[in-house]
Image: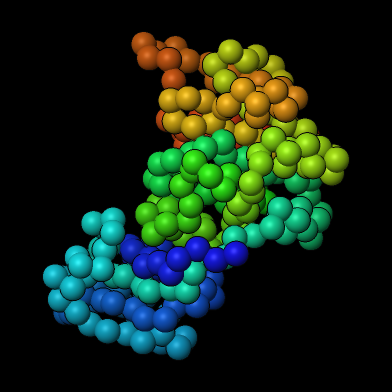
Amino acid sequence: MLYEEIYIEGRNAVLEALRSGRPIDRLYILDGCQDGPVSTIKREARKTDAIIKFVDKERLDQLSSTGHHQGVIARSAAYEYADVSDILDKAREKGEDPFIFLLDNIVDPHNLGAIIRTANLCGAHGVIIPKNRAVGLTATVARTSAGALNYTPVAKVTNMSKTIEDLKKEGLWFVCADMGGEVMYKQNLTGPIGLVIGAEGEGVSRLVKEKCDYVASIPMKGDIDSLNASVAAGVLAYEIVRQRMAGE
């Protein structure tokens, strides 16, 4: 399944897209820009079939949907969603217990991009998002992921609760983030695992939470009572990483 053709914006995002082998149709670069990062991008682009066009800032601003193009925009073929089976296959190929992020109705593209970036860096094998009432793979998501979207498979499913049930048959168990849960440091987060993160402000929906095996909370000592969804995902993900490394 393909999402609409997008423009990848920002130097890091464009460079990682080129290095990953992602098909780039056309590269737009600010005319006269000759600094080191842009020179690296041009060098990588010349290894591909991408057409390089030097344009003025007004043209880049017209193409940009994020407002943060940093003088470079790449027009790319559509991002392709993976199947859930592709994510499991990736874990098998690496000889690792599956580690999957499941995002329950994340609507902010910056949060989704940041979570995909975290998923890649902590060694997760993929991300699952719902088909409805959630953001998809937009240009803002691609830019915020800083290139991680080129390496981390993202699957889109119709029913998150059923997907959890199906993955349980594959041996995974599930932990969701919720302030009412047991502190994460007291839980065993090793083995094949799915980390469930809820929507901004609303948390994990009741139906999805009921499918989870454990509910984990992050200790908080400040004056407010919640973390941004992408920050919460990062904190919990690296507790999973810590426990996995301790068991090696």
State the image coordinates of residue 57 (x, y, percent, origin top left).
15, 70
State the image coordinates of residue 77 (x, y, percent, origin top left).
47, 74
Query: Residue shown at 26%/76% (left/top)?
Result: 29
Q: Is residue 238 visible?
A: no
Query: Residue shown at 29%/70% (left/top)?
Result: 72
State the image coordinates of residue 187 (x, y, percent, origin top left).
71, 21
Q: Quadrant of residue 206?
A: top right
Task: Judge from the rendering whether residue 33 lies leftward or rightward of residue 102; answer left or right.
Answer: left
Specify the color scheme. Answer: rainbow
Give the answer, above or below, for where 64 lies relative to 208: below
Query: Residue shown at 77%/33% (left/top)?
Result: 173
Quarter placement of the N terminus: bottom right
Q: Nearer the viewer, residue 204 or 239?
A: 204
State the image coordinates of residue 143 (x, y, percent, origin top left).
39, 57
Q: Nearer the viewer, residue 221 or 126?
A: 126
Q: Quadrant of residue 130?
A: top right
Query: Residue shown at 66%/41% (left/top)?
Result: 159
Q: Is residue 106 visible?
A: yes
Task: Judge from the rendering whether residue 79 lies leftward or rightward of residue 55; answer left or right.
Answer: right
